[in-house]
Amino acid sequence: MTENNTMQRNLPRQERSLERVKQIIDSAAALFDEIGIANATPSDIAKASGLTRTSLYRYFPNKASIIRALAERHLQALELRFSAVASDLLLEDRIELVIEIYAEFYQNEPGYMAVWSGVDSLPELKSIDQSALDFHSAVIQKQMVSIVADDLDTEQIKMISVILPRTVGSILRLAVQEPELADKYVREAKLLAKVYLTHYADLAAYKLKVNQNDD
């Protein structure tokens, strides 16, 4: 399946059509939460949306394009939340807040858990997974790495920006799967991120001290 086949058809401009697109995405999110993205068929989504399958295809060419639209909605909502994070927060406070936002989305945002725990299992959605990884990496770099140290090299930043979102995301998915342990999992995710990033902060401080002594 090509990249173009997963793209939403030209977004209708009429308000009524825009509402129908929203209805389809909302219905798909609820359905994905109920039965998972792998099990939901276009016919299921059409039925949940109160449409025929033919009518559904007027707005989306296939299931992958619906998942893409929902994923983009998630990332836009996250971006809005992160844009409100105060720029003067200390590292530990910033880690706490960022992980709490992610945990809230996994637990409460319609379709979020279903999409981001299943998107990497479908080959045709590989580009969505990569887009999300790029987004989360940018969040990590802006919200956390940038205040750990200014002199981390490019390779270190890349490794942090890949490893931390993947690892924390796995823990937060466990928090949804085992709700009785959710608070503990979220605490562990925060601890992991703090220890991991503090290591780099200490390393940068040590390098700075060595360089100053050499001078």
Image (cartoon, rainbow, N blue to C red):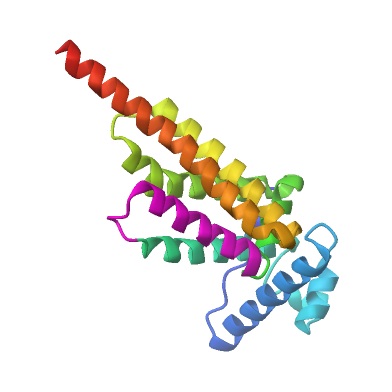
* Numbered circles on residues, count: 0
112 inside magenta stretch: no
Q: Where residue 132 sits: x, y (%)?
A: 56, 50
Q: Where residue 53 sits: x, y (%)?
A: 82, 75
Task: Give the vertical position of 29 relative to 98 (above or below).
Answer: below
Task: Give the vertical position of 45 relative to 181 (above or below).
Answer: below
Identity of the residue drawn at 34% across and 42% down? 146
Q: Where residue 17 sits: x, y (%)?
A: 61, 83
Q: Quadrant of the C terminus?
A: top left
Quick check: 132 left or right of 48? left
The residue at the far bottom in this view is 16
Task: Give the vertical position of 199 relative to 109 (above or below).
Answer: above
The magenta stretch is: 86-108
The dominant secondary structure in magenta is helix
Identity of the residue drawn at 37% across and 61% down? 85
Task: Give the vertical position of 162 relative to 25 (above or below).
Answer: above
Q: Where residue 199 sits: x, y (%)?
A: 43, 31
The residue at the far top in this view is 214
Identity of the residue drawn at 43% across and 26% down? 155
Report whether residue 64 is seen: no
The one nearer the camera, 1 or 26, is: 26
